[in-house]
Image (tube, rainbow, N blue to C red):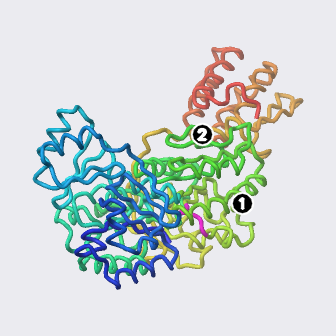
Amino acid sequence: MYFLALAADYDGTLAEHGAVMADTLAALRRLKEGGRRLFLVTGRELADLRHAFAELDLFDRVVVENGAVVYDPATGRERPIAPPPSPALVERLMRRGVEPISVGHSILATWEPHEKTVLEAIHELGLELQITFNKGAVMVLPPGVNKASGLKAALAELDISRHNTVAVGDAQNDHAFLSACGCAAAVANALPALKEEADLVLSGDHGRGVAELIEELMAKDIAMVPTARHGLLVGTGEDGEEIFLPPQSCTLLAGASGAGKSQFATLLTERMAERDFEFCVFDPEGDYEGLQNAVGVGERNTPPAAAEAAKLLRETGVNVVVNALALPREERQALFAELLPPVAELKARSGRPQWILLDEAHHVLPSTAGDMHEALEGLPATIFVTVSPDLLAASALRRVDIALAFGGKADETLKRLAEVLGLPAPLPKGTRRENEILFWDLRSGKEPRRVRVASPRQRHHRHRGKYAAGDVGAWHSFYFRGPQRRLNLPARNLGQFLKLAEGVDDATWEHHLRAGDYSAWFRHVIRDEALAHETQAIEADTGIDARESRRRIRSAVTRRYVEAEGSGG
């Protein structure tokens, strides 16, 4: 269930001639019995609304006075979220014969054609106020107070994301709160301007349109709005069509190290932030340290706490990167397993976070793991990032809806995925060009498509944390042994490499330098071709001594991996 709530205007939407039909009430009750929340958002004052509509208890919150007051029918609490009207303004309008005038907690209302007199009085008194119109009504409120701000306050009380809310209305003052929600619907009798902006234009008018919307919502949920509304842009297909990752989907990004999948994952987080979607990145190797638009939990030498990450995620508007670099691999799995239940519970209750990105997913969901299906249930839209599908748990792969393959062997990557899932091998058409990936919608039955992708604005520090301060493993460590192999000093990361490089004798350093061992390690283990190329030039320069070659290589490393400076792993 993606959409967790329905927010409806009263006059002209739920109500026709001030009354709500029995069929409309029955539809509202069915929606609520299905587990969704109901919000009423109106320009009326509470006393007037109570007189007109006796079923307020059906709603979880009622926003009145065009967003200025939030009312809880269960407790009877009224919470003004704006200051009261100016007594001086009320007095001046009465002296000028403006009537009728209605004064609420925060709203001052009258009718056209008094808007010119109201505007003159506001100007004469030097007040900072705004005028909102609604089918002849003239409403005066403080700046920034409207149905959108009122609904936002009401949603916050129940911790429900606006993206996971459907809104329906009919008039001028409904523009703000419809555009603020994840789906905007207009009843058939709505103003033309509102219909133009709506995601859905209902065939029914007034309450009949709301009942129609409720049936659509219960039957289709997120499928009733275009994918582009909540999806993430992947890129452009060969036919020029924009391709999106659907909301509520599970996506696999796979390809060899350096193929571009982590850069693309960074691009996706930027697009999430642009759309105000909340996300959580589980980062086993510290590659997303310093990611824009997010708060980090854990550092290269400090393990993250699941409780701290969960607490931050509960804060509306906060994106979290869980940096697990300081933990051994088996403890990373335990941390992820500990984080899953609170994230799933938060998603079910509030709709947040909208996305979770699991980098190096094979670290915490390895192919050797048992059935993880039950543990993964209830997660937000998930993005798994891995070097190869066959390294990932089969139960995780069976959740995948979309697969994106990167690098020169993208075809083989998709074939391995198909083998694990027992599907026919996909047959991509055409030759991929630079910046193109393979996009395979596993549920569509169609062959993979070539898609051109963009680059992120921020530089992704590919494996910077792992190589600078992490652990590449015993097999991939650099061993300072020297010409007579009298030493056996392993460097498991670049930080250790630089420390050992400063301490070994000149003969040992020169032995590995002239053998090209340093550039080979940078190329084949660190997988940094630029660093390897720069180091190769230093190795070939016979006119410099051991001290100068040490300095140049150290400078090349620290320039690209600033964390390596002084780190010991």
Magenta residue check for 450 = no
The answer to whether the residue labelled 1 contacts the one labelled 2, judged by CB atoms less than 8 Å apart, is no
Would you name the residue on which mark 2 appears?
A: 289
Magenta residue check for 379 = yes
Element at label 1: helix
Q: Is residue 29 visible?
A: yes
Residue at the (29%, 51%) spot, across then down? 103
Q: Is residue 301 above or below residue 41?
A: above
- Tell me the CA gap for discs 1 and 2: 21 Å
Instruction: Give the crowd class for mark 1: few <14, some 14-19, many >=20 residues within 10 Å.
Output: some
Q: Horizontal placement of 195 versus 324: left or right?
A: left
Query: Can you give x and y, in whole percent of width and height, for residue 362 in the image?
Result: 67, 59
- The tag earlier along the polypeptide, 1 or 2, is 2
Query: Can you give x and y, in whole percent of width and height, for residue 240 in the image?
Result: 28, 60
Would you name the residue on which mark 1 appears?
A: 337
Q: Is residue 431 visible?
A: no
Residue at the (84%, 32%) spot, across then down? 489
Element at label 2: loop
